[in-house]
Amino acid sequence: MRTGYSLHQLTVVVTAAACAAVAGYRSYTAFTEWVADVPAASALALGTTPDRRSSEATIRRLLQAVDPHLLSTTIGVWLAGRATTTSASGRAIASTAGAQAPRRPMPGRHMAEDPSPTRLHALK
């Protein structure tokens, strides 16, 4: 079934949603507000133009179409591919495998009071 969305647009929306989630946003509306408020240079780095950003409906539809298990596995594999056990100076680097990120209060009215930990916490 054709959705009318391109793979490029899916990548942009998933990346923007991940960034918004790491920033503490937890809803489609909040993700849209994050995308609207991001500076122009950051919008370009995400792969979108500053004058044409994704709407709430686009973000919601694309994220609902994504297989959550496949996305979680893909992010996990991506993170694992970047994990190292020692730094260039020989210092050990702590693993995030199986660990939960510490909960810290973050500003923003669109965040849950007690957000559930996700694999995206490893990006903080």
Image: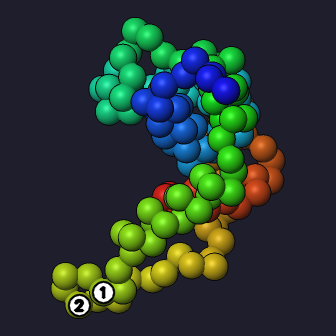
- Measured in 3D between alpha carbons, the distance from the residue under mark 1 to the one under mark 2, in whole angstroms, is 5 Å
Most extreme residue toward the left is 89
Side (left or right) of 31 relative to 77: right
Side (left or right) of 81 relative to 15: left
Comparing 78 with 22, the one in front is 78
The correct choice, above or below, for 102 with respect to 104 in the image is below
Q: Residue at x 32, y 26 (%)?
A: 44
x and y, in percent, of residue 42 in the image: 35, 30
x and y, in percent, of residue 68 in the image: 69, 50
Most extreme residue toward the front is 1
- How many C-alpha atoms fall within 10 Å of the one at disc 1: few (<14), some, or many (≥20)? few
Asked which secondary structure carries label 1, the reply is loop
Kindly indicate whether the residue at mark 2 contacts the one at mark 1 (C-beta within 8 angstroms): yes
In terms of image quadrants, where is residue 46? Answer: top left
Comparing 124 with 5, the one in front is 5
Q: Residue at x 54, y 38 (%)?
A: 14
Q: Residue type at mark 1?
A: Thr
Q: Which mark is residue 86?
A: 1
Q: Residue type at mark 2?
A: Gly
The correct choice, above or below, for 85 with respect to 118 in the image is below
- Which residue is under mark 2? 90
